[in-house]
Image (cartoon, grey):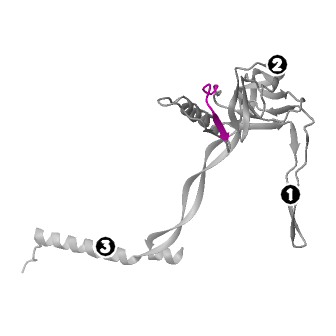
Amino acid sequence: MGAKRIGGAEMKKIGLLFVAVISIVFAVSCVSKQVPVTETYYETEYKTETYTTTKEIVVSQKCGESSIKPKMEWYAPNLTLSGGPHVSYFGCEIPYHTSNHIKVIFTTGLNLDYVSSAYDIGEQIREPPAGKTAGLGNWEWASIGGDLPGSHAVSDWLAATNSKLSSAKELGSWGTTICSKPEVKYSNGRFTWTQPVCEENPVNWLEFDSHETKNLAIISCIVQFQPVQEVQLTWCDNITEKRTVTKERQVPYQVEKQRTVMQTKKVPFWKAIFH
């Protein structure tokens, strides 16, 4: 009998079977193993760099003194401030300087006894409506007389004044007399009260630094005339020049580095044994 020939279909089946067997053998012969692997990464580092820029440098100062004239001034005999009658108002505009020192000089003597307060006010307070009575209690203006029928002059003035005073900054206060604060002490089961002692103010001025003040208002009460004699301004302005200066700054840059990490890979079993 002659040899039996293998057909094309059978050869294809044998080829597939061979591939499957080889794959199984290869899979069985490979194992998982931790192997070192080198990888690249980057870190941010900094270096010092010099550069030039233009800057305003103070090279000197120009200073001077001036007397400030009032921008608004009035006296209201029918107005009361914190329970005291007769209110006097002195408002002036302070020119801008690098630094300002303000000194307000008051009238003293003649057995006067009044108090004054200085305010950094956003807008000057105009004179109250004539012939009306109004009062200022607890640092708020309040109407005592009121408006005539159909008129809103006093109420409008009070509302505007309240708004300005509520946002004003008090810069200082001055009085013709200085009084100590009363003290209450407890001893041997009894309370004792120390009577405040008042004495004449040794100075007739109020002074403060306020280079940001634009509108200055000085309100005085219990006085029947304008007690502000003068507002003196001592000022200084910085004289600057543009100059080129050298500075340093930290500049970031990327540095390439390498490190070894362990990774799991499939390797032939003989490499896992002998390596």
When the figure is inspected, residue 166 is found, relative to residue 212, above or below; the finding is below
Mark 1 or mark 3: which comes first in sequence? 3
Question: Quarter of the image holding residue 36?
Answer: bottom right
For residue 94, side relative to residue 207 (left or right):
left
Amino acid type indicated by mark 1: Glu
Residue at position x 36%, y 75% from top?
Answer: 27
Amino acid type indicated by mark 3: Ser
Residue 88, how many percent across, how many down?
73, 28
For residue 41, side relative to residue 82 (left or right):
left
Quadrant where the C terminus is found in the figure: bottom right
Residue at position x 53%, y 76% from top?
Answer: 274
SS assignment at label 2: strand
Q: Label 2 belongs to which residue?
A: 66
Mark 2 or mark 3: which comes first in sequence? 3
SS assignment at label 1: strand
- Disc 3 crowd rating (10 Å Cα; few below 14, some 14-19, many 20+) is few
Residue at position x 71%, y 38% from top?
Answer: 81
When the figure is inspected, residue 37 is found, relative to residue 242, above or below; the finding is below
Magenta span has 132?
yes
> Which residues lie in the magenta part?
126-136
Q: Label 3 belongs to which residue?
A: 23
Tell me the CA gap for discs 1 and 3.
104 Å
Tell me the CA gap for discs 2 and 3.
104 Å
Magenta span has 56?
no
Q: Label 1 belongs to which residue?
A: 183
SS assignment at label 3: helix
Pick the front one: 268 or 8 = 268
Amino acid type indicated by mark 2: Ser
Residue 194, how many percent across, how many down?
89, 57
Question: Quarter of the image holding residue 260?
Answer: bottom right
